[in-house]
Amino acid sequence: MGGYGSGRRPTRNNGTVSDMRRLDVRKMKRKGCLEPGASGRWGWSRDGETVASVCYQALPDALRLVYSISERGKGPESMDYRVGLEWTPCNYGGSRVWFRCPSCNRRVAVIYGGKVFACRHCHRLAYDCQHERPDDRESRQVDKLRDRLKWEPGLLNGKQWKPKWMRWRTYHRLETEYDERMRRLLVLMRRRFGRDLDAFF
């Protein structure tokens, strides 16, 4: 596959999902890659240039992956295996497709590269938010609320007015949550940075 994961093996202590290239079954379905008989190349790019890719072939109950990988001190190794597909019914009709992890057979929406594409549990990957400091996590939640309220980004910009399309009830609920999260964030930031922080708020 042009070196996906070259020399990079998941370890017990490292890695987050954003460190790895991924195959998302939902995205592949939307692009028609899972229709039986479909085949092609799925690639990852950086700055507009493809840096890695896998060839895929959709079978009735699996996705065949073909690529090559190079590990340190070894020549390229050809990989050719199937990742099972499973469909489950949705509550309001239709069905949802899942990957079956090649390593543990767990039903997952996303598999991550390495020598073999597998679920995050098999690669021992954490979500990015699991490595955040408590104040960073709270700050991210505050930013999300500001975005929902259509307020100008940035904690120092203070509170602004209700978006005209939003119901007052919704606005008051989000504003109350924002105030509470800001209160918690300031407590956490004072613990981290000390009282000097008061000059900014």
Image (cartoon, rainbow, N blue to C red):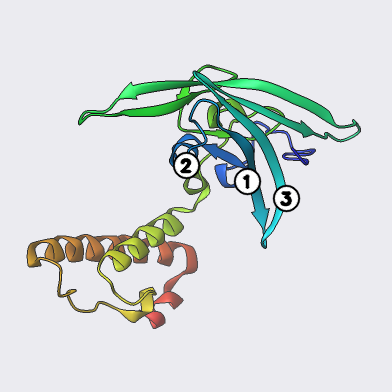
| Residue holding disc 2 | 27
36, above or below 27, in the image? above
| Residue holding disc 3 | 51
Instruction: Tell which tag, 1 or 2, sits nearer the viewer.
Output: 2
Is residue 61 or residue 7 the one in the foreground?
A: 61
Crowding near the residue tagged with mark 2, few <14, some 14–19, many ≥20 C-alpha atoms within 10 Å: few
| Residue drawn at (44%, 38%) of the image | 26
Residue 137, x across and y down, in percent: 42, 55
Tell whether 110 sits left or right of 95: right
**Secondary structure of residue under mark 1:** helix
In the picture, the disc for residue 19 is: 1
Query: Mark 1 or mark 3, which has the lower sequence index?
Result: 1
| Residue drawn at (57%, 36%) of the image | 125
Circle 2: residue type = Lys
Crowding near the residue tagged with mark 3, few <14, some 14–19, many ≥20 C-alpha atoms within 10 Å: some
Crowding near the residue tagged with mark 1, few <14, some 14–19, many ≥20 C-alpha atoms within 10 Å: some
> How far is disc 1 from disc 2 in space, using C-alphas?
19 Å
160, above or below 190, in the image? below
Instruction: Tell which tag, 1 or 3, sits nearer the viewer.
Output: 3
Tell whether 68 sits left or right of 117: right
Total marks placed: 3
Tell whether 20 sits left or right of 200: right
**Secondary structure of residue under mark 2:** helix
Query: Mark 2 or mark 3, which has the lower sequence index?
Result: 2
Q: Quadrant of the N terminus?
A: top right
Q: Quadrant of the C terminus?
A: bottom left
Residue 86, x across and y down, in percent: 43, 20
